[in-house]
Amino acid sequence: MKISFLIKLITLILVTTFSINTVNAKTVLRTDEAAIGEADPAKATDYVDSVLMFNIYDALVDETAIFEGGGITPLLASGWEYADATTLNITLRDGVKFHSGNTLSADDVVFSYNRLMDMGQGFSFLFGNVTEVKALDSKTVQITTSEPYAPLVASLIRLGIVDKDTILANTASGNYGDNGDYGEAYLLTASAGTGAYKIVNHDPNVKTVLAKNNDYFQGHNSKAPDEVIIKYSVEAATIKALMVRNEHEISSMWLPNEVVAALEKEPNVDIVPIPRPGAWMNKLNNRKAPFDDVHCRRAIQLAYDYDALEQSFAVTDTLIAGKKSSGPLIPGLLGYDPNKPAIERDIDRAFEELAKCKYNPGDFTLDLAWIAEVPYEEPWALQLQVNAIELGFDATVTGLPWAKFSDQVASWENTPHATVVSVVANFPDPDGLLYAQWHSSRGGTWMSAEWANDAELDSLLDKGRAETDESKRVAIYQAANQLIIDNAITLFITDFVGMQPINTAVSNDATIRTLTGYGTMGRNLSFRELEVN
Amino acid sequence: MSATQYFLRRTFISIIVFFGASIVIFCLARLIPGDPARIALGPFATQEMVEQYRVALHLNESIFIQYKIFITNLFQGDLGISTYTKRPVLVDIISYFPATFELVLMSVTLMILIGMPLGILSGKYKDTFIDHIARIFSLLGVVTPSFLWAIILMLFFAFLIPIFPVAERMDEALDPPKIVTGLLLIDSLLEGNFKVFRDAFSHLILPGLAIAMPAIGNVARLTRTNLSDIYDKQYIEFARSYAFSEFKIATKYALKPASIPTVTIIGLDFALMLGNAFLVETVFVWPGMAKYGVEVILAKDLNGIVATALIITTFYLVINMVVDFIVLLLNPRITLKD
């Protein structure tokens, strides 16, 4: 009797379980990212943090889409002008509302800046030149820098503006004096921005659920998703299963090649190549023999097999997740020239340059490194080893843990002869990439493992920082771009191209234009511009 | 020794073990290479930012001072801030532990419901076709790791027979029940929300089975062996001579003594699953503590590592104690002194 009842109960549960049919009237876009999501704009550092920031918080400025000519455009600002070389006055847009309904004012901008700098995390490092931010009136903010700093306007894209009143009404006790915890705990589960979406639910290790902010001042695409779900650290096999079952719309760009190749065969999935704002580089130590001699650097630059490198990014016969580089300026950055030819291998010229080098290659064993946590970098270090041996050098290849590399790079003597790293643009200005990597004053960080020491390049980069005329800056950065190539300061492996599997219900013109249209990390996944059919 | 004295003694020993484990885990976590502050702030952070964050995390203090701060905060219910999720570790644990606990409960249930009957059948029909089939099944369960079962089940039920959900704890379109215990099955029943109950139950089946499979094999093999030994005993022959039914002999006289080692194994597996579920949680997008535990190790989140490890330690200690009491109930010949 008891057993038959138990069997009936189990049968009932199973039958009713499998007959669930949920009805979902709202449009939902599901996507995923590899890392955890940081929803506080003062702590954002990574790609997915940036995606959250750009969708929940607005900055004073925005990036103009590449298909509209690129550059910087006002967002929460209505305009700006330099009072003098170090003083920038910004006028705010009228009538912008936060998610709370509060109206944006200059106090919010000042508070957001102070919060970012006091907390000392996220993109606060971009504002090291700023000495003061103050409200001149409710609609005008004045920013003063210690020296003329032309990239200031572009870097403001990384200052997400928070609702001062909401934050202060929700502070807990913390480390920031009268500001308590600066609303850190509050922003773990809530949003206080003006952006196109607001947080419904946020678990940094699991998922974030965003709902459309119907009062958004810029509006939404009429088919923009009502709800967005961003999942974190989902296994590639699971993403594949979900995409095949139409339970996931946009995958991250970090799937293994075999999964991307398998998804390409699915009728409901398109693979969209996304030019990403970054590049793979092999950073030559410019102060360590033999690469302190420009001719040796040029020789290795001309010997590096760029065709083989590009082919190493092949996902299928037609999909290649990399593009030959034409130098440090990448799409979306001021001065990028899409018609500039890519750097190519020329082994005859390589030997000509080697003959001019003061060193005998046979006397050197090159220490070629890649970052151990990123195993797919290894082939590019091995390729350099092959080409170095071709020139007569001996070479060893080492996988360096990131922590060890960070320690070693602090002195040029310990920095490897060449190290594979990737670099992305945090904001749409060439200064952010070029100065941090190649100005001689910046040696000793992972970005500047070249220990570049080129007076002409320093001069160009200093001019680029101080010059506010855009056309002159274009000329300066294009000259710097060419100089970096001519003096073989860095080896450029490829520019990033991400392979993004997208459900056919979403892979329409509007979505693809948005995903491929921006050069700042995370700016492209702008949900309000996408279309879900 | 009375049961109360025995319980107090075990509790006292467990507290000492807990503190010993906390010291070992606290020190080991700091041996993982890499600067937690640098990892937390990302590659673009300046050295000044990193230094400021190290001060906030007390990382520049000696390890003794750091441990003192940790223990003092622990007694105040504060496990510190996770440098990985940037929120209090206690919030993380409260969020993720119930998900793993519910999953492991499901696995243990499946382990008992499938493993023991399989072992009984195998032992009862030793060296017959049924026994061979059951042994092959058990062997496959034992030799195939959980994460492989997860992938196999995922492929099977995602593509060939797509009747089970393959990700998360419940359908995204449903509203979750009000959190009381954090266990969706219980919370949905408390709310009378059977739709969520059914949905949550269906989400538990595949990951629960994937974790349970190796343990099912273990339990079945152990039950079979013990049951075979018991069936060879004279008192079973004696029971048969009295014409007791085979069902009565099996359930009343054979299974009880045969299940003592099995119960011990079930208890250990229960605790083991809590930590070992991470790959299955990863495959099925399960927002659990096992996955969190591995991620905090990779991110060198010191507070997260210590808290997760201590939760699992505590679980082990409690489960061991519970198992000892169950064994006592099953076999009165074992005394508390033993």
Image (cartoon, coloured by chain):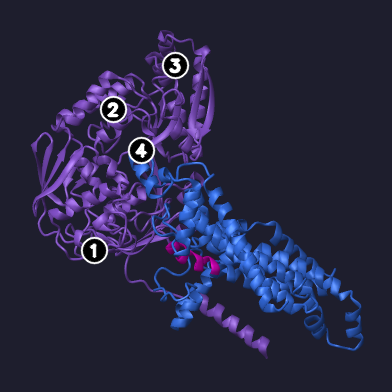
Residue annotated with mark 4: B47
Q: How many labels sit on residues?
A: 4
Return the residue at label 2.
A340
Where does the image place residue B55, in percent across and percent down from the top left?
38, 46
The chain letter of the blue chain reads B
Hey, what amino acid is under mark 1?
Answer: Asn
Residue ID at (54%, 44%)? B31
Callout in the foreground (2, 3): 3
The tag earlier along the polypeptide, 1 or 2, is 1
B225 and A268: which one is in front?
B225
Q: Are marks 1 and 2 in contact (CB under 8 Å)?
A: no
Q: Identify the element where label 2 is drawn.
A: loop
Q: Chain of mark 3?
A: A
Is any part of residue A70 visible from this angle?
A: no
Chain corresponding to purple in the figure: A
Which secondary structure type mostly characterizes the magenta part of the structure?
helix
Q: Nearer the viewer, mark 1 or mark 2?
A: 1
**Which span of residues is magenta-colored?**
B90-101
Are the residues at dot 4 and dot 1 in contact (C-beta closer than 8 Å)? no
Mark 2 is on which residue type?
A: Lys
In this rendering, the answer to whether A443 lies above or below A498 is above
Q: Which residue was labeled with disc 1?
A: A213
The percent position of residue A309, horizontal first and vertical second, equals 45, 30
Which label lies toward us, 4 or 1? 4
Q: Residues within 10 Å of mark 4 (few under 14, many from 20)?
A: few
Pointer 1 and pointer 2 on the same chain: yes
Q: What is the chain letter for disc 4?
A: B
Residue type at mark 3 is Ala
User: Which of the chains bears the disc numbered 1?
Assistant: A
* Residue at image mark 3: A289
